[in-house]
Image: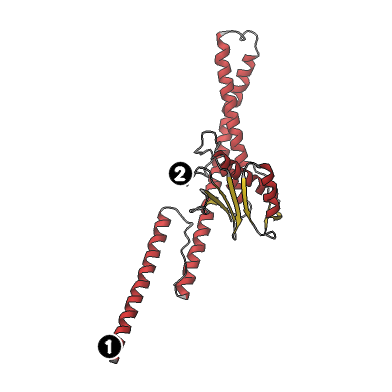
Amino acid sequence: MLYIIISIVIVILAICFYHHQTILRDRAYLMREAIRNHDFTFHLPVKGLFFGERALQEALNDLGKDISSLVAQNEVESWQKLTRVLTHEIMNATTPICSISQAYLNNPQIKGTPYEEGIRTIYDTTRGLSTFVDSYRKFTQLQEPVPTDIILVDLINSLKLLYKDIEWNVSIPSETTIHADENLIRQVLINITKNAIEAGAKKMDIRWNNALYISNNGVPIPAGARREIFIPFFTTKSNGSGIGLALSRQIIMRQGMNLRLADTPVSGYHTTFIIE
């Protein structure tokens, strides 16, 4: 009888051990696939793990978040370097063309001739290109942050006054504060709100859960565009500039935080951004 009980216990332990090892194997597979796909925002649960495994999983979760922040920072710095070179080269090429074509347009001998339309086209094109370059400059010439303790509720209330046509749901404890530059954070919130409105949003949700979650019910971001939305001048909207989100991420990262798109939006909404 004792032999049978011992055998049953051994079988149960073997099954439990196999099941536990299967769980660990599946976790390793999920993390490997996430890293292969350059998705470092994975966060696997620690429930059911032994204390050592739990500590290891928590460390891996935190490491994934740190890697995600470093990747985002590297992307921002790379775009900054590229835009500095591009703005310099474009301005060197367009400035003399714009000046010369303007001089010709002001020449009485040109006005009313067949040449005027062609020269005006050249002038308008170079002016448009200069405006495009100004957008690049906004991305590379940000003011230095002056951080203070900001009461989040007060900041959100000031944002709500700017967009009264939006239905707002705010769930932030009154005592919640963040240490950041108030004007720059306000600009980020405005950019995200304008982006949501351009996507047809009528409702916004802002809540605090150890980070700031900003959600909207506008048209969802296409799956194929999720990785590109923070690239300067990339946009999925016909009337979008493609600079707002890229600029917002740079502003946030200069203050020691990160701006990212949530893998799963807050329930009841289509898109959620996280500032953490």
Q: Is residue 64 above or below residue 87?
A: below
Residue situated in front as seen by the camera: 38 or 95: 38
Residue 62: x percent and y percent? Answer: 52, 63
Residue 147, above or below 60: above
* Label 2 secondary element: loop
Q: Which residue appears at 60% of the width and 44% of the height?
A: 193
Q: Quadrant of the C terminus?
A: bottom right
Q: Nearer the viewer, residue 249 or 212?
A: 212
Left or right of 239? Residue 3 is left
Residue for badge 1: 4
User: Can residue 4 be spotted in the picture?
Assistant: yes
Report the disc number at residue 200: none
Left or right: 214 as drawn, with respect to 184:
left
Mark closer to the observer (1, 2): 1
Residue 118 screen position, x and y as percent? 54, 15
Identify the amino acid type marked 1.
Ile
- Mark 2 is surrounded, within 10 Å at the Cα level, by few (under 14), some (14 to 19) or many (20 or more) other residues, namely few
Closer-to-camera residue (211/37): 211
Location of residue 23 (image quadrant): bottom left
Which residue is pictured at 39% across the width and 57% down the height?
33
Relative to 76, residue 88 above or below: above
Let me know if residue 80 appears in the view. Answer: no
Report which residue position mark 2 lands on: 222
Label 1 crowd (10 A; few <14 / some 14-19 / many >=20): few
| The N terminus sits in image quarter | bottom left
Q: Does the CB distance between marks 1 and 2 fall below 8 Å?
A: no
What's the coloring here?
secondary structure
Q: Is residue 155 left or right of residue 259?
A: right
Q: Amino acid at mark 2?
A: Pro
Residue 106's place in the image compared with 13, above or below, is above
Q: Residue 144 in the image: state x and y as whole percent.
A: 68, 47
Mark 1 or mark 2, earlier in chain: 1
